Amino acid sequence: MTKEELVKGVSKRMEISQSQASKGIDTMFAVLKESLGKGDSYRMIGFGTFKVVERSERKGRNPRTGEEITIPAQKTVRFLPGKELKELMNPKKQKAAKKKKK
């Protein structure tokens, strides 16, 4: 999905103009980036959690030369899907688990 498709979908569902939808989406992502930039996590119940994690220094290889290199430690963002999103992505597994409980 592209940003354009997201804007059209939000615009249609909320019955607002595409420019209003675009402003709302841009604002949401600006707030999300600001929050993650401070090291905070962002949790949207049912969808998932974005959180900042520290990756330690590690060894790697230059793919062109095969030379061993050191990849420096850095912060990165991880996404952990929420329960509802997992169920949406894996409907058969959830149905099978519910049947076992009965």
Image (cartoon, rainbow, N blue to C red):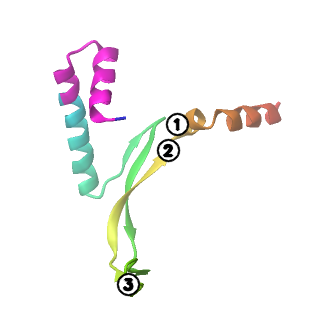
Q: Residue at x 51, y 41 (%)?
A: 82
Q: Amino acid at mark 3?
A: Thr
Disc 1 designates what residue? 85
Q: Disc 3 on helix, strand or loop? A: loop
Q: Which residues lie in the magenta part? A: 2-22
Q: Secondary structure at mark 1?
A: helix
State the residue in front, 13 or 47: 13
Q: Which image quadrant is residue 25 in?
A: top left
- SS label for mark 2: strand
Kindly give the residue lying farthest to the front in the view shown. Answer: 64
Q: Which residue is mark 2?
A: 81
Q: What type of secondary structure mainly makes up the magenta span? A: helix
Residue sitting farthest toward the bottom: 67
Q: Amino acid at mark 2?
A: Pro
* Residue 56 point in image, percent of width and height: 40, 76
Q: Is residue 23 left or right of residue 12?
A: left
